[in-house]
């Protein structure tokens, strides 16, 4: 019954968006100490690395609450805009050629990233059940209680299955982000290439969110 989600477009679209939020959260949490140690050797990663994941975890319920007030798609769209800007901020404060860099600015930009991943976790998680319930109820005669109940059950089942599947897919962010840092550092001497890939990915998430969910008359 749940396997029907593999033929649903919105399952795969939300996998992409949840990878951008939850996947980013666990990936940044896993890779943050490595990045601090490699870019700012004089700084003790253990003194700072725990603050970002804590902030992202604590703020997640706020993302759901805000989505209840403003709409999940709107919150997710602007969340990805801020995430993309924060990645550029991280790049601006990194050392260049092993010289310079500003740890305070770097750390604050990463706190913004953790903040937005937490909010985005809540907003994307809010979107999924609404999307599938609306899809199931589309075209159903509201005056027919049996049809409404049947469609509601179907929408809730698909929404629950999609929540589980997207979370499983997004968990790969915990592998890809640290691996991207390591690959970028080994090939280019710095993490900049990986961060530019993340920036491009967030641009894709912005476009997908806007086109499919956030724009006026979005499907």
Image: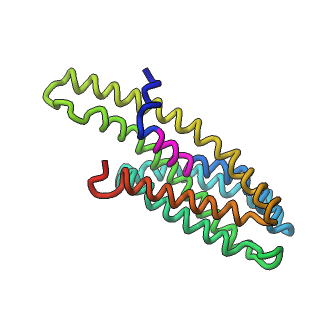
Residue displayed at 24% across by 36% down? 138
Q: Position of residue 143 (x, y in %)?
A: 13, 28
Q: Quadrant of residue 2?
A: top left
Q: Quadrant of residue 190?
A: bottom right
The prevailing secondary structure element of the residues shown in magenta is helix
The one nearer the camera, 192 or 86, is 192
Q: Position of residue 113 (x, y in %)?
A: 60, 61
Q: Eyeballing the image, is 1 above or below 17?
A: above
- The stretch in magenta equals 12-21
Apparent side of residue 78 relative to residue 171 in the rendered image (left or right): left
Color style of the picture:
rainbow
The one nearer the camera, 200 or 123, is 200
Q: Position of residue 4 (x, y in %)?
A: 43, 26
Apparent side of residue 139 relative to residue 80 in the rendered image (left or right): left
Apparent side of residue 62 relative to residue 135 in the rendered image (left or right): right
View extreme (left): residue: 143
Q: Position of residue 72 (x, y in %)?
A: 39, 50
- Residue 106 on the magenta span: no
Residue displayed at 41% across by 44% down? 127
Q: How many numbered callouts?
A: 0
Q: Quadrant of residue 140?
A: top left
The one nearer the camera, 142 or 210, is 210
Q: Eyeballing the image, is 190 above or below 31?
A: below
- Quadrant where the N terminus sits is top left
View extreme (right): residue: 42
The one nearer the camera, 47 or 199, is 199
Residue displayed at 33% across by 35% down? 133
Residue displayed at 30% across by 32% down? 136
Q: Eyeballing the image, is 125 above or below 156?
A: below
């Amino acid at each position: 019954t749940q396997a029907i989600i593999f033929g649903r477009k919105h399952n795969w679209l939300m996998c992409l968006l949840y990878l951008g939020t939850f996947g980013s959260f666990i990936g940044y949490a896993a890779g943050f100490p490595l990045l601090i140690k490699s870019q700012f050797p004089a700084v003790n990663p253990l003194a700072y690395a725990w603050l970002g994941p804590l902030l992202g975890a604590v703020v997640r319920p706020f993302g759901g609450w805000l989505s209840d007030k403003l709409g999940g798609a709107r919150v997710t769209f602007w969340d990805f805009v801020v995430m993309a800007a924060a990645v550029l901020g991280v790049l601006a404060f990194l050392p260049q050629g092993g010289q310079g860099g500003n740890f305070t600015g770097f750390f604050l930009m990463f706190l913004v990233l953790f903040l937005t991943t937490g909010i985005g976790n809540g907003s994307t998680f809010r979107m999924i059940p609404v999307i599938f319930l609306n899809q199931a109820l589309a075209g159903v005669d509201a005056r027919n209680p049996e049809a409404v109940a049947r469609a509601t059950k179907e929408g809730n089942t698909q929404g629950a299955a999609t929540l589980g599947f997207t979370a499983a897919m997004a968990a790969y962010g915990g592998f890809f982000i640290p691996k991207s840092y390591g690959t970028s550092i080994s090939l280019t001497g710095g993490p900049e290439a990986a961060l530019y890939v993340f920036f491009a990915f967030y641009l894709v998430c912005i476009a997908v969110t806007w086109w499919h969910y956030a724009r006026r008359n979005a499907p």
